[in-house]
Amino acid sequence: MKHPVREGIARARKSAVHLEMRDSYTPADPEFARWRAGHRYDGDPARLPDWWGTWRDVVEEATARGVVMRRARIVSEPVTEYIRYEHDITFANVAAGELVRWLPRRKAADIPLPGTDLWMFDGESVLFTYFSGVGEVVDREWRTDPQIVQLVSNAFELVWDRAMPHEEYKPV
């Protein structure tokens, strides 16, 4: 499977939810390096990296056919530099049609959470993403076991209910 997330979104009929729980991803990302060097997006899509256009197309196509896309991020506070970068670029996710919320980790302490980031499609299948300690993707695994899907669904909904919409969250 070359792009399992995109394949899951392409097959989704009604929902695609993404739960992110790491404080850093792909530290060698050249776009993150540019941001660290002072490049800012300032809410201007023209300043976004080239790869953004293909993701935007995926999101716009899915939401146009009625798929609700929700992304929830559980973050440590004070936030890492990488989370500041993600927050800075998230305006583009929202503009493309994703609903994005942020939850400080201390407000998630009593939520039974899966052990890794994931995507869930139509409340039927879960794509777990496994990372190395530094945040590089190591592997992905599809699961459709009803118990796992239910765990993920319950966890995501609890996170979503407690989290703040992107427009309201200010990184600490």
Image (tube, rainbow, N blue to C red):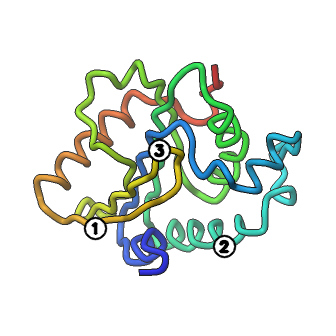
For discs 1 and 2, the disc positioned in front in the rendered view: 1
Q: Tell me the quarter of the picture where residue 163 sits.
A: top left
Q: What residue type is labelled 1?
A: Trp
In the figure, is residue 88 to the left or right of 65? right
The residue at which mark 3 appears reads as: 133
Task: Determine which of the numbered discs, if any, sits on residue 54 in the image.
Answer: 2
Q: Residues within 10 Å of mark 3 (few under 14, many from 20)?
A: few
Judge by depth and name the residue closer to the eye, 122 or 80.
80
Q: Which residue is drawn at 20% across and 55% down?
A: 149
Coordinates of residue 71 in the picture (x, y in percent): 48, 48
Query: Which mark sits nearer the N-terminus, 1 or 2?
Result: 2
Q: Which of marks 3 and 1 is nearer the N terminus?
A: 3
Label 1 sits on residue: 142
Name the quadrant of the C terminus.
top right
Which structural element holds mark 2?
helix
**Residue 144 percent coordinates (x, y):** 19, 65
